[in-house]
Image: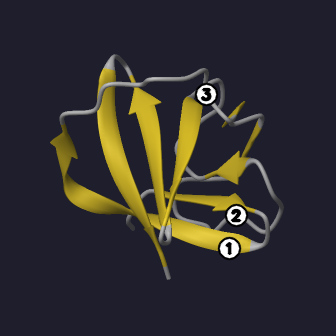
Amino acid sequence: MARCVQLDGVRYFESPAQINFAANRDPDGVIADSVAHDAFPETDGCSNFGTGYSYWVTGDGVVIVEIDGAYWEFMAN
């Protein structure tokens, strides 16, 4: 199952590759809750890949999540 995070009632799914991203501001938040990797999150600030990851909402249905020092693009579904 694809990695997924829910923010503001929207589920965002990971794109297939990490991206280059230069954060020009503080993160918009940190993922604070988690469900099993084979389940979809049902509350805001929750993911199916763990907690403690910073994220940036970039607009147009895109969220960037920093996972273990790499940046991943997540797209709204």
Determine the secondary structure under disc 2. Answer: loop
Looking at marks 3 and 2 on the same chain, the residue that comes earlier in the sequence is marked by: 3
| Residue 22 pos. (x, y %) | 31, 25
CA separation in Å, label 3 and label 1: 18 Å
Side of 21 where 27 appears, left or right? right
Q: Looking at the picture, which amino acid does disc 3 mark?
A: Pro
Which residue: 19% across, 41% down? 19
Q: Is residue 25 left or right of residue 22?
A: right
Contact? badges 3 and 1 (CB < 8 Å): no
Secondary structure state at the residue bearing disc 3? loop
Farthest-out residue, front: 24
Disc 3 vs disc 2: Cβ atoms closer than 8 Å?
Answer: no
Residue at coordinates 37% horizontally, 19% vertically from top-left?
Answer: 68
Q: Which residue is mark 1?
A: 10
Disc nearest the viewer among 3 and 1 = 3
- Ranked by sequence position, the earlier of labels 1 and 2 is 1
- Judged from this view, the residue extending furthest toward the right is 43
- Looking at the rendered image, the quarter that the N terminus falls into is bottom left
Q: What amino acid is labelled 2 in the image?
A: Pro
Q: What label does residue 27 carry, if any?
A: 3
Residue 9 place in picture, x, y as percent: 78, 72
CA gap between label 3 and label 2 equals 20 Å
Gap between marks 1 and 2 measured at Cα: 10 Å
Q: Amino acid at mark 1?
A: Val
Query: Circle 2 sits on which residue?
Result: 41
Q: Nearer the viewer, residue 56 or 37?
A: 56
Q: Nearer the viewer, mark 1 or mark 2?
A: 1
